[in-house]
């Protein structure tokens, strides 16, 4: 099972439609749970990170293999990500990806991470990044099953 925990709601219909499309495609390979927690408003970054940490932590199970999306994380190719997911699934059937809010992730969430993943040193809009992550998870499963999509 793949779980994606992300901060903030999807506002634009075209983003929601893209997410629904990848959710549909992934049904063939795995269960997918997408959890959106509210982004917190404050002028103090520490307050925002603490509140978002609390909201995220409610959805992490002790047995989850947690992959945090961090600029400081390890960059993988699509084939390497596919191999990583396959490797994790052999020891743990619950993979949880976490996408932070505008200020990233609280240190406690980063410490809970089993693997820190970076897609790029570039900054992406959070709503768009969810779609990029879903597409790469889908691509990973296509690679695992030797299907032609990834070429």
Image (cartoon, helix red, strand yellow):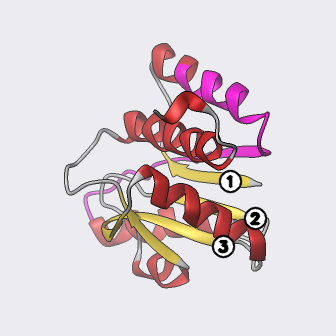
Residue 86 drawn above or below residue 72: above
Q: Are marks 2 and 1 in contact (CB under 8 Å)?
A: yes
108 is higher (above) or lower (below) than 120: below
**Dot 1: within a 10 Å radius of its alpha carbon, few (fewer than 14), some, or many (20 or more) residues?**
many
Which element carries disc 3, helix, strand or loop?
Answer: strand
Q: Which mark is first along the chain, 1 or 2?
A: 1
Are the residues at dot 2 and dot 3 in contact (C-beta closer than 8 Å)? yes
Separation (CA) of disc 2 from disc 3: 6 Å
Number of the label disc, if any, that sits on residue 65: 3
Region rendered in magenta:
18-44
Mark 3 burial class by Cα count in 10 Å: few <14, some 14-19, many 20+ = many
Residues marked 3 and 1 touching at CB (< 8 Å): no
- Camera-nearest residue between 35 and 95: 95
Query: In terms of secondary structure, where does tag 2 sit?
Result: loop
Residue 95 spot, x, y in % from top left: 68, 63
Res. 104 in view? yes
Residue under pointer 2? 94
| In magenta stretch: residue 53 | no
Classify residue 130 as left or right of residue 25: left
């Amino acid at each position: 099972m793949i779980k994606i925990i992300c901060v903030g709601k999807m506002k634009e219909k075209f983003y929601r439609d893209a997410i629904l499309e990848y959710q549909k495609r992934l049904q063939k390979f795995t269960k997918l749970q997408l959890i959106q927690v509210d982004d917190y408003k404050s002028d103090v970054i520490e307050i925002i990170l603490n509140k978002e940490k609390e909201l995220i932590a409610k959805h992490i199970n002790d047995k989850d293999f947690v992959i945090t999306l961090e600029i400081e994380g390890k960059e993988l190719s699509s084939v390497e990500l596919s191999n990583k997911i396959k490797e994790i699934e052999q020891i743990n059937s619950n993979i949880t990806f976490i996408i932070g809010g505008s200020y990233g992730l609280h240190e406690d969430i980063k410490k809970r991470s089993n693997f820190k993943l970076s897609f790029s040193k570039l900054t992406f809009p959070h709503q768009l990044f969810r779609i990029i992550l879903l597409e790469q998870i889908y691509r990973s499963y296509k690679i695992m099953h030797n299907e032609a999509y990834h070429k």
